[in-house]
Amino acid sequence: MALAHGFMEEMSGVLGNVVIVHRGKKTFIKNRPKRTENPLTELAMLKREKFGLGGKIASAISSISEIKLLWAGNPEKNLTGYNRMFIANHGQFNIEDLTGKIVVSDVTGLEVLNPSIELGNAGVEINCDWVESKDNNKEKATAKIMAAGIIVLINPTEINKHSKYQIMTFKTETFPIGDSGKFSANVKYLGGDVTKFQAFQLKKAFGVFVTLDEEGNPIDISETVESRV
């Protein structure tokens, strides 16, 4: 793999026998992988499934703009926020039984008291009794609060209509923070609707609380909260 220069720095994708990829602020050129006619081993298939699931989870998290903005890149390691999301989630979650973890946030700047996510037939409800930022400057700038995250669904009731699993995203409306600091809201689905939600027998949600300033810019984020299956 080599660094790209000149006009090739603006390109991406497959070009003949090479692939141009972007990592952080750098562009690299590498040889295009050769296709093999040999069947994949069970271990290779498992690795491919884990890689694919990690990518889908990272993409779902990244699609929520308020969360994406709070995943800072690491220029020294040439990592974007998305790269960090993928690394944090690769191989961490078992899609077969919904065990393991999903990292929606890898920081704990926002302290939350008694957070919970409840799943019911009608949808998702997320609550907490109190929030406060550890950073005084962020706390002073805080004016609003919201919650967001992803829901993993498996075991569809009608196998012919749905894939083995689905990942939905959700977020609540944004509310002014009251004196009590309490927060409770039903979610709205971004990657589907309640019909899709109800079409699967097993579900697990992973979410975070996000504080914002008066203009709606995200300021701070809690650690990941998860529901029961």
Image (spheres, rainbow, N blue to C red):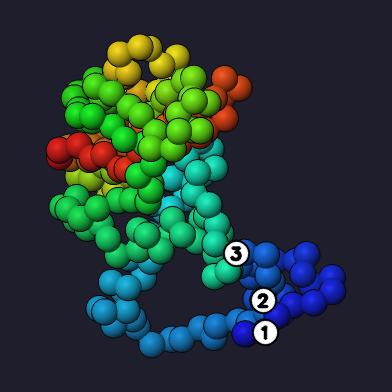
Query: Contact (CB < 8 A) between labels 1 and 2?
Result: yes
* Left or right: where 227 falls relative to 68: left
Q: Earlier in the sequence, mark 3 or mark 1?
A: 1
* Left or right: where 117 falls relative to 185: left
Q: Circle 3: is it few (<14), some (14-19), or many (20+) Cα within 10 Å?
A: few
Q: Position of residue 42 (x, y in %)?
A: 25, 78
Q: State the residue position of label 1.
A: 2
Quarter residue 121 falls in: top left
Kindly report which numbered mark, 3 or 1, lies closer to the viewer in this rendering.
3
Q: Residue at x 49, y 25 (%)?
A: 140
Residue nearest the viewer, comparing 225 with 161:
225
Q: Circle 1: is it few (<14), some (14-19), or many (20+) Cα within 10 Å?
A: few
Kindly report which numbered mark, 2 or 3, lies closer to the viewer in this rendering.
3
Outermost residue, top side: 179
Residue nearest the viewer, comparing 3 with 197:
3
Outermost residue, right side: 6
State the separation of the CA atoms marked 2 and 3: 15 Å
Q: Earlier in the sequence, mark 2 or mark 3?
A: 2
Q: Position of residue 123 (x, y in %)?
A: 26, 24
Q: Residue at x 24, y 53 (%)?
A: 101
Q: State the residue position of label 3.
A: 75
Q: How many marks?
A: 3
Q: Please, what secondary structure does the residue beneath circle 1 have?
A: strand
Query: Label 2 is placed on what type of residue?
Result: Phe
Residue nearest the viewer, comparing 34 with 173:
173
Query: Label 1 is placed on what type of residue?
Result: Ala
Q: State the residue position of label 2.
A: 28
Query: Label 3 is placed on what type of residue?
Result: Pro
Q: Is residue 67 visible?
A: yes
State the separation of the CA atoms marked 3 and 1: 18 Å
Location of the C terminus (image quadrant): top left
Above-or-below relation of 116 to 100: above
